[in-house]
Amino acid sequence: MSLRIVVCVKYVPDATGDRRFADDTTTDRDAVDGLLSELDEYGVEQALRIAETHGDAEVTVLTVGPDDAKDALRKALSMGADKAVHVNDDDIHGTDVIGTSAIIAKALETTGYDLVVCGMASTDGTMGVLPALLAERLGVPQATLLSEVTLDGTTVTGRRDGDAATEQISATLPAVISVTDQSGEARYPSFKGIMAAKKKPVTSLDLDDLGIDTDTVGLTGAWTAVETITARPARTAGTIVKDEGEGGKALAAYLVEQKFI
Amino acid sequence: MAEILVLVDHADGVVRKPALELLTLARRIGEPSAVVLGAGPAATDIAAKAAEYGAAKVYTADGAEFTDQLVVPKVDALTQIATAANAGAVLVTSSGEGKEIAARVALRLGSGIITDAVDLEAGTDGSPVATQSVFAASFQVKSKVSHGTPVITVKPNSTTPEAAPAAGTVETASVEFTGNAATVTARTPRVSSGRPELTEAAIVVSGGRGVGAAEGFAVVEDLADALGAAVGASRAAVDAGWYPHTNQVGQTGKQVSPQLYVAAGISGAIQHRAGMQTSKTIVAINKDPEAPIFELVDYGVVGDLFTVLPQLTTEVKTRKG
């Protein structure tokens, strides 16, 4: 049987745009264009590389999101993924990470998987906890935050660069991995890839298909609640000086005044 | 008062500063208890330090599992201790591993999770309210865990550690390991640069594209050493191979929040801003007066970093005597 690789991706507001919140405390998705989270491109890339070296492998890209999230799936398909699964349901709006992990875990069990690949974090919420939550829910090992990945038979190995040490990690499939932006430059979709992506199958699933109770998701099902959101006050304009030969001394004087020296 | 569990981050047998910050924050919402896992013989010293900073109890557990397997043994221990102690909240440092541990503990406890808090206070009902800085620090969000035992990860440098001696009664916890973990087959400790750890440092001096080459970082390092600061690098400098990725400041690198951030030759792309915008005081040196970094600064110098930094370094050394 072929190796089933599933890449979890997220459709996020463009970080270079003016990101905002909607009145219900969720991300205002209308305010800024969305796109495939940049850090998930590294996940797609590693999945494709593993599939290429493995021979008999199939790469499925999976997302949970509104209609527009199809754009993220198309990008991944145009990079070379074989097929896509889109979990889309109005009741999902406002779901927190615990609920999202439940939805994705169910979807993974529905589609089947041997290796689940994630990016290190989304570029909007930047929590970086979803891969660990998936491993917990699926009852499989997590080999996360890898900067290098290799699959040999049913053993996935990789390098994890922690704060205090660099570790070599090993896990037996089925497993969940996440990869960092150091894992290898993500490929650009070719024209051929973009054309081929249009013909690739995208399966849509809703909460009913996954057997998920709507009470456990959305804003009402969330286990965290936002109390207040405040826009950070604009920074008061700082002092800017042009270096005419004494710039370093002037800066030193400022740092003395601020008691840093 | 409810026990607030603090997972104590330690390295080389020494408590890391963020753990002392967590103990300090924990006192605002209950009675701190420290959890010290896999510290070996250093557990005694670590427990004493935790007591010095307010831990009434210190739970310790040891075993090869904590170092030989990834994340899961710590999740097993922390969950079992939290359940037995009927903890009021669980606090963990916001590192890559810390967030992963916290997430799995939250799921096992049937609790919500908040990550990357930059402040913590007791709400009107006494339960913790966490402040997060989001969307590249353009918003401050205050939120609560509304279900179960609040599990919250807190970024380093969110508060100043304050000593508050407490009993520090040590209890050895027996942990049932659940398995299903990835194996750590080798570990290479990071070679210490002798400088403060990037996320913990009170002052960070970072270099970017304007530094021009790996050798160019010497002027950045000289200033950092004069100030007793950590050295950071922008993604552009790291991608160019001039400085190690472990020093990268930004959305995909380290998120820093020091008292003083000095950006040298950094334009200030959104990805970089996301990693440093919560710094208390921001200073930049850049040749380009139009660089977006100048929108953030408290003090900016338009000029060549190779003349400005050495002059500043000399001044710092002179004034420090």
Image: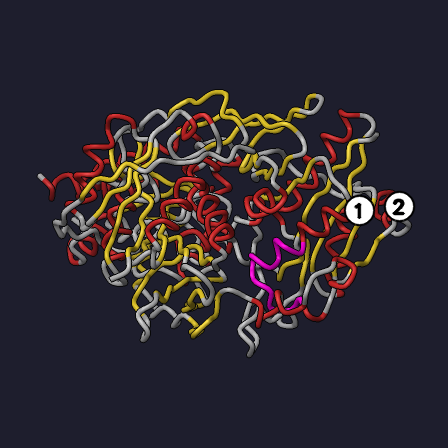
User: What's the CA distance linking mark 1 and mark 2?
Assistant: 8 Å
Q: Is residue A21 above or below residue B258?
A: below
Place residue A65 in its image quadrant.
bottom right
Q: Is residue B222 toward the left or the right of residue B140 in the image?
A: left
Q: For the residue carrying disc 1, how many other residues have a C-alpha within 10 Å: few (<14), some (14-19), or many (20+)?
A: many
A142 lies above or below A237: above
Q: Find the magenta span and give its range.
A: A92-103
The chain letter for the residue carrying disc 2 is A
Residue A217's x, y, as percent?
62, 65
Q: Nearer the viewer, residue B130 or B30?
A: B30
- Tag 1: amino acid: Leu
Q: Whole-percent x and y of residue B158?
A: 30, 55
Which chain's residue wears label 1? Answer: A
Tell me the element at label 1: helix
Residue at 56%, 39% (x, y): give it: A180
**Which residue is pictured at 17% across the width and 39% down the height?**
B48
- The amino acid marked with disc number 2 is Ala
**Residue bearing the label numbered 1:** A77
Label annotation for residue B48: none
* Residues at discs 1 and 2 in contact (Cβ within 8 Å): yes
Residue B280 relative to residue A137: left or right: left
